[in-house]
Image: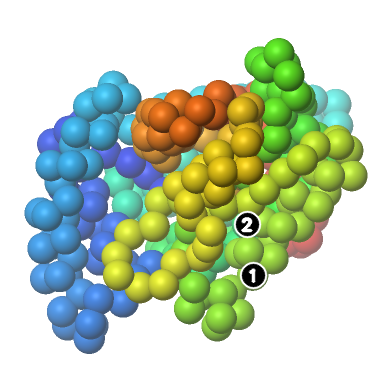
Amino acid sequence: MIGVILLNLGGPDSLNAVKPFLYNLFSDRDIIKLGPSFLQKPIAALIANTRAKKTMDAYSLIGGKSPLLDITNAQADALENLLNSSPITHQPSVFFKVYAGMRYWHPFIEETVRQMRNEGIRKILALSLYPHYSIATTGSSVKKFKEVAAKYSVEYSCVLSWFNHPMYIDALVENIKKGIQYFTEKPAVLFSAHSLPQKFIDGGDPYVKETQGTINEIMKKIDIEWYLSFQSKSGPVKWLEPSTEYMLHELAQKGMKNLLVVPISFVSDHIETLYEIDILYKNMANELGINLMRMESLNTSPKFIEALADIVMKGIEEGR
């Protein structure tokens, strides 16, 4: 039996979980270094306390919790079913079991790996659900996974990036085409990616290069006017530019009337799609005279699950 663990960010499963979730997030020095290491957790606690109310208000507008775990579990179930039934991936002597492991909230990666070990899993493929590699996302999650896996007698391999996987690109193109149909006139497309501190990229992080690589592959399959921006920055350091807020104002000045936002670095709905894009940016766009709609997230779309299955099979082969 082969276990597959889908590595993801995690999110608060209630409003009461918001503050500890934020604390876990800002305690991770792979995301942001808050002074010397001995001050990381005290400063993280201060930030969590400061931001908790505003963040809770945002989650209150999208159902009182993050939907990320529910969606990741649904992706895991769909992927497991496909791996064990498809004539392309199914092998008579191999059975797959797929789990979700979260970095900053339950089920934590360490909880999931322990469960896998207790259920008899001895071979594990860790698959990051971040298509584009960054030390702050995939890097941090895989680092934690390896630390935990080293405590158990399991063989493992990891898939770190799949930004240009053909079936993933096809899944994106399919949803972009669906999104374009929402409009009476063909819109421009704004790819909105999660932002990072600029110093990460200056230090060699491939995140922006891989994000642009995904867009380049999409452009081979669809003819659209497009732009790239970055969302969800926090803190006083220099972040990637242009921000999505800035780009909305720029496009409004150019006379843009119809805009399809594609959350290019997110494969599942969560607060950054449901609140930031669907509420904040949509309201901002309305005030600027732009008709903004968002591409449906990949979530459990059949093409995306097929892509994940192919990524798993290639990852196992490479792991051997």
The image quadrant of residue 224 is top right
The residue located at (39%, 57%) in the rendering is 233
Q: Tell me if residue 267 comes above or below residue 236 in the rendering.
A: above
Q: Residues within 10 Å of mark 1 (few under 14, many from 20)?
A: some
Residue in the foreground of this view, choosing between 7 and 213:
213
The residue where tag 1 is placed is 206
Give the residue at x 24% y 49%. 21
C-beta proximity under 8 Å, tags 2 and 1:
yes
Report x, y in % for residue 45: 12, 62
Q: Secondary structure at mark 2?
A: loop
Q: Is residue 132 visible?
A: yes
Numbered-mark total = 2
Q: Quick check: 275 left or right of 294?
A: left
Q: How far apart, in angstroms, are the residues tagged by discs 2 and 1?
A: 8 Å
Residue 257 in picture, x, y percent from top left:
61, 28
The residue that appears at 41% across and 34% down in the rendered structure is: 284
Which residue is denoted by mark 2 in the rendering? 132
- Whether residue 120 is visible here, answered yes or no, is no
> What's under tag 1, amino acid-wise?
Pro
Query: Hey, which quadrant is residue 308 in on the image?
Result: top right
Q: Is 6 on the left or on the right of 106, as rendered?
A: right
- Please tell me which residue is depicted at 55% across the width and 83% down the height of the picture: 203
